[in-house]
Amino acid sequence: MGLNLSRRDFFKLTTITSIGLTVSSFFGIKTKAQDKPLEEIKTNIADALKHPRNANSMPGKFPGKVAQVNHENSIKDNVINADAAYEMLAKGMLSLTGAATLPEAWKQFVNENDRIGLKVNPVAGPTLSTSVELTQAIVKQLEESGIRTKNILIWDRREPELHDAGFTDDKFPGIKIIGTERQENDSWYDENGKLYGERMIDKEWYYWANCEMEYDAETMPYMINQGEYSYFSKIATQMVDKIINVPILKNAGASITLCLKNLAYGVTSNTARLHKPLWSETCAEVCAFPPIRDKVVLNIVDGIKGCFNGGPGADPQFITDYKTLLVGTDPVAVDRIGYDIILQKRIKEKLQKVESERGMKFLGLASDLELGVSDINKIKLEKIEMA
């Protein structure tokens, strides 16, 4: 094909979460039912809705409310100001909760006995992933609120990507850093030829859809399984009690990849099959299952820098300093505000003229599932400007 690109490097560029068509054409993956009309595709969303909600269920304690904190000095020459990240997070937490102190704010969501998972997004490497600085600020404020370091873990789908993006033991001492798709001794497979990732999926929890793809041997480590089932990670189902979702402010074509996408495609296996026919449905429906719906207590969007085109990869010409954080319990409302931020930038850059109905479809679906508020007129946005 005339490309001097390793498979792992390709995944870093496309992050396999771009679109299934790209992955298929590059790897020659055979597809099944990828061209099936949407109306013929069924899912098991009804199974999710059978489970009763609890006090933590989306949209959480503050439905329809978003705190946006802007800080002009949060980044300069591509270097994030760690002190500014801490201050922005503090202002956002106090604004969202109305608490008098930071510990009071954090303890509205977590307590000393909770096992807390920080769900970051490292797929674009150190260039455009959830920043180490913001994640360190979250950890510090949790610790200052009485949360023990041993009760915090940082996670995503692919463990090697976490390390590549800067989530390492030296930067987060005492904190477990783990991925669903794992390696040991630079190998994806154990001595019996089984993927280490197979140990990390919970087959009691799954998202079923009657569409599938067949992956070759080199692609399997990144998908774990094929067929019509996408299994939830044991990190979400068994290893944590509360999840703090920390996506980055990025586009995905005329849509976005923020709270709902970071969760839906980051907590399940076998996701390439879902991109072409069911991108919007997956973003909404996976988040309606109890391991996500009932555990994600807070969403903190890292918008200190992000992108407005070419996402979810890291094309340098489309990376921009948004210098903002979005904080909320309602992932739909947070995504809706994030969408508007990216839309205005795309309009300014003449990439788009108006909002995309298709690009916002997943927000409407998520709202229909009672995961949050998608109507911009019903969202309470509190903006804070910091010098």
Image (cartoon, rainbow, N blue to C red):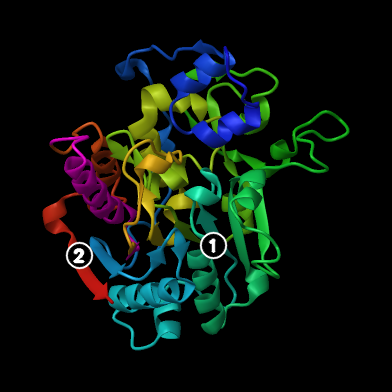
Residue 132: which disc? 1
Residue 83 visible in rendering: yes
Q: Amino acid at mark 2?
A: Leu
Question: Disc 1 vs disc 2: which is toward the camera?
Answer: 1
At which x and y percent is residue 302?
A: 40, 59
* Disc 2 secondary structure class: strand
150 displayed left or right of 43: right
**Residue at the location (70% across, 66% down)?**
170
**Which quarter of the rendering shows the C terminus?**
bottom left
Residue 190: which disc? none
At which x and y percent is residue 368?
A: 25, 43
Q: Amino acid at mark 1?
A: Val
Extreme right residue here? 191
**Residue at the location (38% across, 12% down)?**
36
**Category of crowding for the residue at label 2, using alpha-carbon neighbours closer than 10 angstroms: few (below 14), some (14–19), many (at least 20):** some
Residue 381: which disc? 2
Q: Which range is magenta?
A: 326-353
